Image (tube, rainbow, N blue to C red):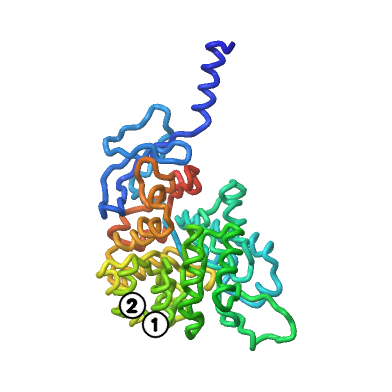
Amino acid sequence: MKTTFTIALALLVRFASGQTYALIADKLIDPKNGKVLENPTVIVYKNHITGVNYNNHIPDSATVINLKGYTLLPGLMDVHTHILADGGDYDKDLYGNSPAYRSLRAVKYLSKLLDQGVTTIRDVCTEGAGFSDFDIGRAVDSGFFDGPKVIPSGKGIAATGRYYPMGFQQNWDIPLPSGTQFATGHDECVRAVREQVSHGERWIKLFADWGTPTFDLDEMKAIVDEARKYHVNVAAHATTKEGTKMAIEAGVRSIEHGVAFDDSLITLALAHHVYWCPTISVFEYFHEPMDTVYKYLNRAYKRNLKIVMGTDIGSFPWAANDVKELEYYVTKAGFTPMDAIKTATVNAAELLGRQDRSGQLTQGFLADIIAVKGNPADDIKLLQTVAFVMKNGKIIKRPEVK
């Protein structure tokens, strides 16, 4: 029979096993309601937010994290990354660097994202590294190293011969790897989806075009319909009007890049409840002409098309600040700072099906929390200097004590 002392000791060990924090700050951004709230206290126990109050109530057991002078926000989400790429020599990655090497290199890139306040990513195509993104996500979840939550998409699916490196650029007599999985016709498209889902991928990346339209509508629908059987969504690379139109009609969840959007495609996307992930950063890095894209991004925003933050980091070097994407939305596409923040929080959480646990600082949600000096709802550039990062209840970064 257990003694009272034994029971008491067991309860003490149980409740001592998780640290309680009280984060006090000047402001808290509530992106769902578009509000900036004053003098918040956020209570965190283990990996969840257990309470938010504005009367400075602090549990006796809590360790206080003083962030006076700072604004608290939900951790940010980049829903278009390539963590297995480095923005450099693509052929060297395919032919000279193993998936294992590229996965180990990705640890550095994930650490960099987390340091910048990005606590969740959707990785859309491993660029020839197989299903490494799934394993990397498992490693993060297992606590092997600190990084953002990884939502994997695996190999991607492109029409045969229609993805980099192009077949005519290689020795046709030597079977060489490519940056994606190729498929032709209904049956091969279905097979590719089944294979990728069987390896744990929770999104499918579809290349609706590559310079010109590639898959036809029936092939795209085969991919989307098969993925839907397993409750898996499809993200479509689309840069042409025809490719974008077919991808939307086929039922994809998000359009990636979307540089061909016009008024009619915005209308079509709204009717199909499709999200637009514009990846402005990659085009700005390569100095692409963007006036028309910004024009229609502004129109899409004003018509309430759901915009989500994605950068395409990895397609350009990792030296860039990932969160600069939000600055482009404000300064060049006419978003308010609050609505730009929504693209990386509540909108992104909805796209990923995580709206019940991420994207807000509210009771019951995961403790993915960042803080910046000042108020980013007034100056979006402040989000490029994140001072405090908590991921899943673990403090990753905090301001230096002076």
Residue drawn 49% across and 84% down?
Answer: 211
Whether label 2 touches label 1, CB < 8 Å: yes
Is 9 positioned to the left or the right of 280 in the image? right
Q: Position of residue 212 (x, y in %)?
A: 48, 85
Sort mark 2 into few (<14), some (14-19) or many (20+) by Cα contacts within 10 Å: some
Query: How many numbered discs sit on the rendered protein?
Result: 2
Check disc 2 and report the residue beneath it: 265
Which quarter of the image is occupied by the C terminus?
A: top left
Residue drawn 35% across and 37% down?
Answer: 51
The correct choice, above or below, for 43 with respect to 37 in the image is above
Which quarter of the image is occupied by the N terminus?
A: top right
Residue drawn 39% across and 41% down?
Answer: 364
Sort mark 1 into few (<14), some (14-19) or many (20+) by Cα contacts within 10 Å: some
Q: Nearer the viewer, residue 183 or 133?
A: 183
Disc 1, SS: helix
Type of amino acid at the residue the image marks with label 1: Lys
Q: Position of residue 337 (x, y in %)?
A: 30, 62
Is 175 positioned to the left or the right of 266 in the image? right
Disc 2, SS: helix
The correct choice, above or below, for 14 with respect to 280 in the image is above
Disc 2 to disc 1, C-alpha distance = 8 Å
Check disc 1 and report the residue beneath it: 241
Is 259 positioned to the left or the right of 108 in the image? left
